[in-house]
Amino acid sequence: MRDVAVIGVGITKFGELWDKSFRQLIAEAGAKAILDSGIEGKDIDEMYVGSMSSGRFVGQEHVGALVADASGFSNLHIPSTRVEGACASSGMAVRQGYLSIASGINDIVVVGGMEKMNDVSGASATETLATAADQEWEAFFGATFPGLYAMIATRHMHEYGTTKEQLAQVAVKNHANGALNPYAQYQREITLEQAINATPVAYPLGLLDCSPVTDGAASIVLCAVEKAKKYRDNPVKIIGSSQGSDSLALHGRRDICTLDATVHAANMAYKQANLKPKDIEIAEVHDCFTIAEICAIEDLGFVKKGEGGKAIDNKITPRDGSLPVNTSGGLKAKGHPVGATGVAQIIEIVLQLQGRAEKRQIKNARIGLAHNVGGSGATSTVHIMEAM
Amino acid sequence: MGVARFWREIPQRYNLLGDKCGSCERIFFPPKESCPYCRRKSIGKMKEIKLSGKGEVVTYTIIHVGPEDFEEQVPYPIAIIKLEEGPQVTAQIVDCDINEVKIGMKVESTFRKIIQDGSTGAIYYGYKFKKRN
């Protein structure tokens, strides 16, 4: 098996992008990544793109070919495949690109992720996101997507004494990070009071516990490590790539408060990288809701089960903490264009490891982790990266 | 969405019909084609079983922002209920003040209307849960 590196990254502004279409967004992100990498179109062996629900959001399926076409590659006939796993779609696309290079089939692969969520009404977007849940046995009975994470939160509070204030701290921290990210949807800080007193969505979660509805796209260029230095001096090596799955419905899980798909993926990635959780210096985790970040840092092994709520008071996850989490602003403040999120997380880690994260730069970070979740935890991907 | 999609689930949703693995005796709801613990040993040995409908709230939420079909019902409680026979289900809790819903609350299933497909469309039924003494 061959080693694989990231040699280029590109991302659009995240937000309500009324003046840009689905295909413009992915073409922009792809062009930026290709220019950043120094490759040319003819160097690309294959493309993988993540999109959760382009069919419902913009009425367009068959987006593998569309992305190649919109990027100006229709006459090169590059194979381009769409990958879907709800909000983990592009974490999975990265893994497919990684595997195709590691296997020796491809040398250079462009991976993208995108979602255009604001062309439909808020109610319609909510309904589409609920398709990541079990339609027959959760959504049919009136469970919403925030409602599922809210039930994780209620149980976490009951079992471990996690508080609504600790949930709010996650939102405050991630907004403070997002304020430093020029690509973030919300580049502003919020107060603890605002977060605690926000409009209720699904008890115990309020509006500021939830990631927003976002348009955006992100892209990276992957290359076999032996050829990576030809394109740039500081490629970032992927030293662990893994994925896990679990029961689609939350009620089918072993434990309501543990995402076993994440535990599985994390164990595999640590094993592959020959590292332990304590070796990770920076992480982007899937904070689609504040409780999701708390569960993620537990399931990834950064803190013990039940201790996730205290990670901010214990100075672990803030920017000046021992393991900064979601320096990009996370899904909460950077925004969550669902199909783009997995790639966007990897981009933040790459920028940090290359010292290109500007105002949010963490000093001397060498090893980072990106964690992407689909649904309420039925799919999870983990990627561990190292500066070269 | 086609009505057949809902017809297919009627036996389970109306009568809480699950199934039992003939190999390890574990009970599943909704019914599974094979047992995830016994896998090939369970094929052809899954037997239909009617569940008691009695259980306990494992966790819950109060939905304030509901899907379009449920908009008129907000705020409403949704819970995960662990049934006496083992399986867990997601359902609404009804016939009580929303502030009464708690983890550990004993509940039993009740047959109710879930939604109506528009003002003249099909009415879909299923289980909800209410407090049990």
Image (tube, rainbow, N blue to C red):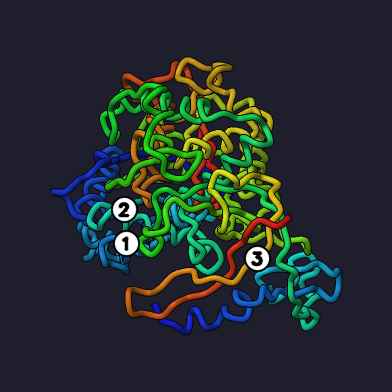
Q: Amino acid at mark 3?
A: Ser
Element carrying mark 1: helix
Image quadrant assignment for residue A54: bottom left
Above or below residue A232? Residue B35 is below
What residue is shown at x 33% (from left), y 79% (from top)?
A: B120
Q: In the image shown, does A36 or B126 lie closer to the viewer?
A: B126
Q: Are marks 3 and 1 in contact (CB under 8 Å)?
A: no
State which chain disc 2 sits on. Answer: A
Q: Amino acid at mark 2?
A: Glu
In space, the residues marked 2 and 3 are separated at their CA atoms by 40 Å
In space, the residues marked 1 and 2 are separated at their CA atoms by 7 Å
Name the residue carrying label 3.
B109
What residue is shown at x 30% (from left), y 47% (from top)?
A: A217
Say which mark, if any, is on residue A115. Answer: 2
Q: Name the side, left or right, on which B83 lies relative to A379.
A: right
Name the residue carrying label 1.
A54
Q: Name the side, left or right, on which A348 lies relative to B13.
A: left
Measured from the top left, where is residue A148 in percent x and y? Answer: 52, 50
In space, the residues marked 3 and 1 are separated at their CA atoms by 38 Å
Q: Name the side, left or right, on which A296 lies relative to B37.
A: left
Q: Are marks 1 and 2 in contact (CB under 8 Å)?
A: yes
Q: Residues within 10 Å of mark 1 (few under 14, many from 20)?
A: some
Q: Are marks 2 and 3 in contact (CB under 8 Å)?
A: no
Measured from the top left, where is residue A244 in percent x and y? Answer: 60, 52
